[in-house]
Amino acid sequence: MLKALELPKVEYITSPEGKPKSVVVSLEDWKRITETLKIMSSKELTQSIKRAKQQLRHKTNLLSLDEVFENL
């Protein structure tokens, strides 16, 4: 079962003109955000994730961890 993701708690710091100028997030949220950005910016990783999702959608017979290591 998928666990619901909690969105980061964001607080906007506004400039005197009332327009958002910066964002404050917790260190834990910042680490999660930057890790996600690293993954999304990697063409190889995003293609691998897309392939895995397609395999799961089509109920492809996947290998167990032991089978993966046996094939190395």
Image (cartoon, grey):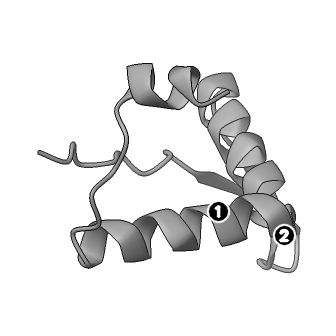
Give residue 10's position: percent from left, percent from top. 57, 51
The residue that label 1 is drawn on is 48
Q: Amino acid at mark 1?
A: Ser
Q: Position of residue 45 (x, y in %)?
A: 74, 58
| 42 lies left or right of 58 | right
Q: Seen in the image, is 65 located left or right of residue 26?
A: left
Q: Which quadrant, please, contains the C terminus?
A: top right
**For this view, does 29 lie left or right of residue 65?**
right
Asked whether 5 or 41 is in front, the reply is: 41
Which label lies toward us, 2 or 1? Answer: 1
For mark 1, give the secondary structure.
helix
Of the pair 12 and 55, the residue shown nearer to us: 55
Q: Which mark is residue 43?
A: 2
Tag 2: residue type? Lys
Residue found at x 26% / y 76%: 57
Q: Rounded to the nearest whole Å, what is the CA distance between mark 2 and mark 1?
A: 9 Å
Q: Quadrant of residue 12?
A: bottom right
Q: Tell me the SS state at disc 2.
A: helix
Residue 1: x %, y % from top left: 11, 45
Query: Where residue 70 is drawn, which disc sits there?
Result: none
